[in-house]
Image: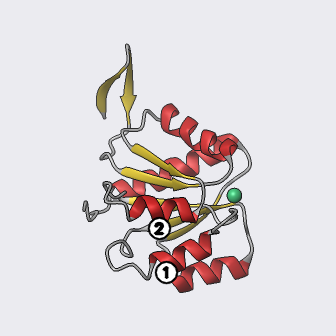
Amino acid sequence: MIFGKYGSAFFVSYHVLPMNLLLIEDDAIETMKFQRVLKKIASPHKLMEAKNGEEALELLTSGNQLPDIILLDLNMPRMNGIEFLTKLKQHDQIKYLPTIILTTSENRHDLLECYKVGVAGYVIKPLKFEDYETKIKSVLEYWSNNELVKA
Ligand SMILES: [Mg+2]
């Protein structure tokens, strides 16, 4: 375990390497839930946010620092998750970015479609916050244990 300092309060953080995360999510409540988990686990990760696929693509192609992983919602206005994925895979510079679906959709068609286009994971968000927190924590721990491209 690593002891760190956040503001004036000391916390015990999980032994995870810091990552740049891109959360693509249209629902502000969902984004707040995700931020709440990061805060609760004293996450060392940096969070970028986009409200739909279109905004995410702009962000990824604007020359900004790229995220290490992408967390992607499926149901979004303008450009939904699968449309975004399809576009992402057409971009040589960004198509390698590990993309994990974060959704409430247990729709098998969505799941197959996502794996077909090429996702690194498909995670169904539990409704109960405690369960959601446990799952997000484990996803972040898993990915911080991976070798990432760090472009
Ligand atoms: Mg949504």
Report the residue at 60% width, 76% height from top: 83
Answer few, some or many: residues within 10 Å of disc 1's Cα (few below 14, many 20 plus, some between 14 and 19).
some
For the N terminus, the quadrant is: top left
- Comparing 98 with 132, the one in front is 98
For disc 1, the marked residue is: 118
CA–CA distance in space, label 1 to label 2 = 8 Å
Q: Residues at badges 1 and 2 in contact (C-beta under 8 Å)?
A: yes
Which residue in the rendered view is the most extreme toward the bottom?
Answer: 116
Look at label 2 and name its amino acid. Thr
Answer few, some or many: residues within 10 Å of disc 2's Cα (few below 14, many 20 plus, some between 14 and 19).
many
* Element under disc 1: loop
Left or right of 33: which side holds 11?
A: left
For disc 2, the marked residue is: 99
* Element under disc 2: strand
Where does the image place residue 92, in percent across and percent down from the top left? 34, 80
Where does the image place residue 136, in percent across and percent down from the top left? 54, 50
Report the residue at 62% width, 83% height from top: 113
Where does the image place residue 39, in percent across and percent down from the top left? 49, 32
Look at label 1 and name its amino acid. Gly
The total of numbered circles placed on residues is: 2
